[in-house]
Amino acid sequence: MIQVVLFDVNETLGDLSCLRARLEDVGAPGHLLPTWFAGTLRDGMGLTAAGAYADFAEVADCGLRSLLTGLDGWAGDARRASAHVVSGFTDLDVHPDVPDAVHALHATGLRLATLTNGSVAVTERLLERAGLRARFETLLDVSAPRAWKPAAAAYRHAVDRLDTAPDRVLLVAVHPWDVDGARRAGLRAAWLNRDALPYPSMFEPPDHTITDLRDLPDVLTA
């Protein structure tokens, strides 16, 4: 029986789309967002694979400065521009399907927690803005294990802090690599497939697949 639902944060709970406007504010195209975010994840995971660590804000800032400097015709101040865009993580809203799902899961008696490659401070701000902070028992990030997900150390840190057996914890994430990492670390996992994409065959499969987070309470109580 699942005792804890452990949520990824960026893109799973938090909607990053508002960062497109921040990019446009500094003269960059909004469609740069997926490239920048994917590059941030790549570089953070690369550091973990090499046995090193840097926090999300630093990696995101360095990556965006490089992208902006390489844009044809862009001649702004990369340091100031990046600071403006990265600071937008503190102003994110949750996806529309999040509030109802969180309230319903909490009502079933499940413990709720988060684990992010970002920061606890950003998660706290996100949940407070949505009026959901009180529903969550614990907010965690990867700064303590100094290892980005999907490294096993990140999930072990969460399980230790939650004082729960790994197979009693269900990770919920939009990223297949996060689902795979959790499964390999002994956790259960639910893939939130909002875009109706095929699941990559090389990854460990999720225990559950949903297209709307509001479906998860019924899936878990069925």
Image (cartoon, rainbow, N blue to C red):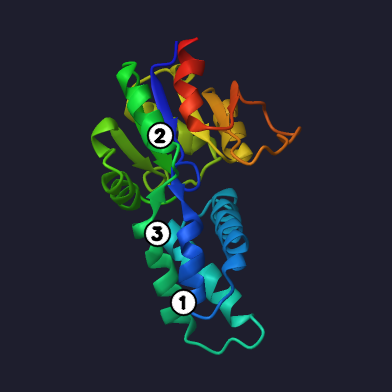
Check disc 2 and report its element: helix, strand or loop.
Answer: helix
Residue 180 percent across, percent down from the top left: 62, 32
The answer to whether residue 20 is seen in the rendering is yes
Q: Secondary structure at mark 3?
A: helix
Mark 2 vs mark 3: in front: 3
| Mark 2 touches mark 3? (CB < 8 Å) | no
Q: Position of residue 123 (x, y in %)?
A: 34, 47
Real-space Cα separation, disc 2 to disc 1, in angstroms: 38 Å
CA–CA distance in space, label 2 to label 3: 24 Å
- Nearer the viewer's eye, disc 3 or disc 1? 1
Q: Which secondary structure, mark 1?
A: helix
Q: Which mark is residue 25?
A: 1
Mark whose residue sits in front, 2 or 1 = 1
Which residue carries the number 3 mark? 89
* Image position of 26 (left or right of 141): right
Identity of the residue drawn at 47% across and 48% down: 10
Q: Give the mark nearest the N terminus, 2 or 3.
A: 3
Q: Nearer the viewer, residue 79 or 132?
A: 132
Coordinates of residue 30 in the picture (x, y in percent):
57, 68
The residue type indicated by label 2 comes to His
Question: What residue is disc 2 on?
Answer: 157
Q: How many marks?
A: 3
Q: In which image quadrant can residue 130 be found?
A: top left
Residue type at tag 3: Phe
Which of the two discs, 2 and 1, labels the residue nearer the N terminus? 1
Would you call the spot at circle 3 few (<14 residues within 10 Å), some (14-19), or many (20 or more)? Answer: many
Q: Earlier in the sequence, mark 3 or mark 1?
A: 1
Residue 115 vs residue 91, the one in the foreground: 91
| Image position, residue 169 (x, y; %) | 44, 22
The three-letter amino acid code for the residue at tag 1 is Asp
Residue 137 visible here: no
